[in-house]
């Protein structure tokens, strides 16, 4: 991909997101639900394309420092999510939902204009892999374990992000504005956690940090699942965010060591299945909450964190045949 093509991809991605958000603003209730599917499909398409384009643009930095690059990207992602959650919370009682969606759509629209006027150097891309190389990953135990780990971690992280406000509204009776502020606190804790993790990475063993992070997220999910007061909700949210923060950068760094061809911006065989599957967790929780009640949306991420811990232990055991330490 040339620099000119990269700029074109980023512009198309932002315009797709802008158009989809604008379309969603015109399909709020009482409009039939299935009309919104087109907007959500376009929004996901734009977000996925933008993610791939951005990782193409930072390929050189990623090859030098995988964990640091993912951490920095995660910090900016968390900052954007935090700002949007705060803005929506502040505007919730002032503007209508369609108006808020139109306001949110302004951001990708402005970036589309910015990318159209910018030049991009040709990104460093990974070599093209054959179908046989991709299929071979399905026979490598470590690749399967890493994929499952990413599957459950992404599922845990996005299940909390998608369901936390609704959970707090139903479970504790909080106002939508206050619930959105606690969601902003979740993104803030993720962002601060990644900054702290970046500072301590050179001084602690990554394996110990990873296990401590998983245990913290498990405890935070447990507190959220059983709390009946605002303090418990805030403390559990902070613990979950800080616990989730270092996991993905550390795992990506380890994947980069074991599988040099892996790049988080490209779909790489079995990793595409893992990452895509992980994003299905919020929808799955919708069906679970219908059957077992809204409390299950915090219990399942807690179980997912336990599964992540077990997968880390399995990866350690598998790695003993190839490397003396994780």
Image (cartoon, helix red, strand yellow):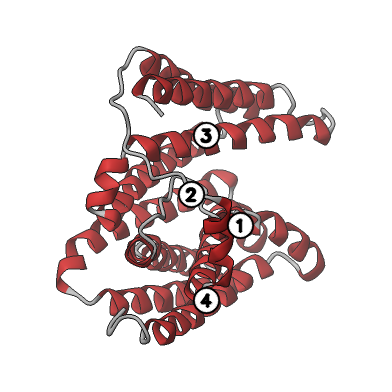
Tags 3 and 2 in contact by the CB under 8 Å rule? no
Tell me the tag on residue 49.
3
Residue at image point 43% right, 22% down: 5
Question: Which is more foreground, mark 4 or mark 3?
Answer: 4
Mark 4 falls on what kind of element?
helix
Question: Which is more foreground, mark 3 or mark 2?
Answer: 2
Q: Earlier in the sequence, mark 1 or mark 2?
A: 2
Q: Position of residue 132 (x, y in %)?
A: 57, 57
Q: Earlier in the sequence, mark 3 or mark 2?
A: 3
Query: Which residue in the structure is indicated by mark 1?
Result: 273
Question: Which is more foreground, mark 2 or mark 4?
Answer: 2
Mark 3 falls on what kind of element?
helix
Label 3 and label 2: CA atoms lie apart by 20 Å
Residue at image point 38% right, 19% down: 4
Q: Nearer the viewer, residue 21 or 130?
A: 130
Residue 114 visible to an observer of this rendering: yes
Label 1 and label 3: CA atoms lie apart by 17 Å
Label 1 and label 2: CA atoms lie apart by 17 Å
Tags 2 and 4 in contact by the CB under 8 Å rule? no
| In the rendered image, the vertical position of residue 141 relative to residue 262, given as above or below | below
Q: Earlier in the sequence, mark 1 or mark 3?
A: 3
Assess disc 2: are there few (<14), some (14-19) or many (≥20) residues with their C-alpha within 10 Å of its C-alpha: few
Query: Which residue in the structure is indicated by mark 2?
Result: 129
Q: Earlier in the sequence, mark 4 or mark 3?
A: 3
Tell me the tag on residue 141.
4
Q: Is residue 217 left or right of residue 226?
A: left
């Amino acid at each position: 991909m040339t620099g000119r093509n990269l700029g074109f991809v980023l512009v198309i991605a932002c315009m797709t997101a802008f158009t989809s958000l604008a379309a969603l603003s015109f399909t709020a209730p009482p409009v039939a639900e299935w009309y919104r599917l087109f907007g959500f499909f376009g929004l996901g398409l734009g977000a996925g394309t933008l993610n791939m384009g951005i990782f193409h643009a930072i390929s050189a930095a990623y090859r030098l420092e995988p964990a640091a690059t993912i951490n920095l990207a995660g910090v900016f992602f968390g900052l954007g999510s935090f700002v949007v959650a705060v803005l929506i919370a502040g505007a919730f009682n002032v503007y209508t939902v369609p108006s808020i969606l139109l306001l949110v759509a302004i951001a990708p629209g402005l970036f589309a204009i910015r990318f159209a006027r910018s030049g991009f150097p040709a990104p460093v891309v990974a070599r093209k892999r054959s179908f046989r190389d991709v299929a071979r990953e399905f026979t490598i135990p470590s690749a399967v374990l890493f994929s499952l780990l990413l599957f459950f971690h992404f599922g845990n992280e996005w299940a909390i992000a998608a369901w936390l406000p609704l959970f707090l509204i139903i479970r504790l009776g909080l106002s939508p504005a206050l619930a959105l502020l606690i969601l902003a606190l979740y993104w803030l804790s993720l962002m601060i956690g990644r900054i702290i993790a970046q500072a301590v990475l050179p001084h602690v063993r990554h394996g110990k940090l990873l296990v401590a992070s998983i245990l913290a997220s498990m405890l935070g999910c447990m507190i959220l699942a059983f709390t009946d007061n605002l303090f418990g909700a805030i403390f559990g949210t902070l613990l979950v965010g800080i616990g989730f923060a270092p996991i993905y950068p550390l795992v990506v760094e380890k994947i980069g060591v074991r599988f040099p061809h892996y790049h988080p911006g490209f779909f790489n065989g079995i990793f595409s299945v893992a990452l895509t599957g992980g994003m299905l967790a919020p929808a799955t929780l919708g069906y679970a909450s219908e059957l077992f009640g809204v409390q299950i949306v915090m219990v399942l991420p807690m179980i997912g964190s336990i599964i992540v811990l077990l997968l880390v232990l399995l990866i350690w055991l598998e790695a003993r045949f190839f490397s003396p330490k994780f």
